[in-house]
Image (tube, rainbow, N blue to C red):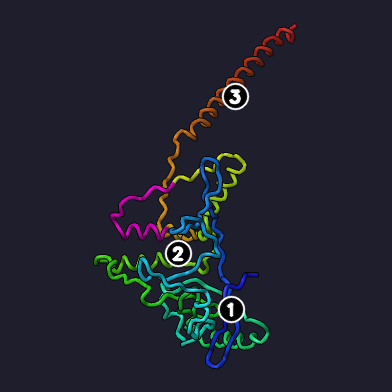
Amino acid sequence: MPRSIWSGAISFGLVTVPCHVVSASEDHSVRFHQYHLEDMARVRVRKFCEVEDREVRSDEIGKGYELTKTQVIPITDEDLRNLPLPTAKALEIHGFVPWESIDPLRIGEGYYLQPDGQVAVKPYELLRQALARSARVAVTKFAWSGRERLGLLRVRDDVIVLHAMRWPDEVRDPAELYPPEADVSDAEVDEAVELIERMTTDRLEGPDFVDHYTEALEKVIEAKREDRELPEAPEPEKPAGKVLDLMAALQESVDKAKASRGEDTGTDAQVHEMPVKKTAKKAPAKKTAAAKKSTTAKKTAGKKTTAKKAAARKPRRSA
């Protein structure tokens, strides 16, 4: 069961929903450590005091705000716990908006909210069903990790999900990144839209949505562990070169998308007629003629032989 990383309550008008917050995602990345290449000993980072020039223990380390290079204001964990904020231990709902109205750039990590105890089950289910029926998401504020944050509450299956959000001033203005104007025809846009339609999928599943990097890295690690030859890297696809005809490139992309789905590309196949050999029927004719000559010769020889035998018998009859 995932570990709770925060405990508090959802404040929904006069309704309070005690809950735990657990992470909604898992990281399966392959992690590396740093090692000394000479003896492969682990390299670690140690914390030193700049004044005393010695390593300090974790219980000797605290937080502080630097006013100047020579003046620091210490801040304790108790100071942070006792901040005069209503959101210190609560997810305060401040309003409801359509999900489509939220800029995805402002959405951060996702967390599951779990009711804290039997007393929280009914108000939790009440809020979940109300959110699902209204087709809205709740906008909340909460204090977490040393700062106050915006959040979204939405329904996923039978669970309420909390998304951390960025404040408006935390999203950079893309105005300086706008590309220069370019003339694009309606036909090119239509072809691009068709390509989008051909590449549309209902779910983000299948071989195209697999972490091939992690798979390849695990194969390399396993090969090194067993002292085997490392797997060969596939040959990279050669770039098609500079695109001179955008429409032709789009059409080719559409055809490839159709072919990958087993659809007819709509291009006419070229049929070539195979040449017929003129000598194919002459060989049997020659064999027939030769056979006729052989048969005639045999018959003639047979007649001559019979004639000779008849001539030989005539003297006997005269005797």
- Earlier in the chain: of badge 3 and badge 2, it is 2
Q: Quadrant of the N terminus?
A: bottom right
Q: Is residue 242 magenta?
A: yes
Residue most toward the front? 52
Q: Residue 199 got which mark?
A: 2
The spot of residue 248 in percent (x, y) is: 33, 57
Q: Which quadrant holds residue 244?
A: bottom left
Q: Amino acid at mark 1?
A: Ser
**Mark 3 and mark 1: Cα distance apart in space:** 111 Å
Q: Is residue 92 magenta?
A: no
Q: Which residue is mark 3?
A: 295
**Mark 3 and mark 2: Cα distance apart in space:** 74 Å
The spot of residue 317 in percent (x, y) is: 74, 10
Q: Residue 272 got which mark?
A: none
The spot of residue 167 in percent (x, y) is: 40, 77
Measured along the vertical axis of the image, is residue 4 above or below residue 54? Answer: below
Q: Which residue is painted at 52% across and 45% down in the image?
A: 36
Q: Which quadrant holds residue 189?
A: bottom left
**Regarding mark 3 in the picture, which secondary structure is present there?**
helix
Q: Residue 7 got which mark?
A: 1
Highlighted range, magenta:
236-255
**Regarding mark 2 in the picture, which secondary structure is present there?**
loop
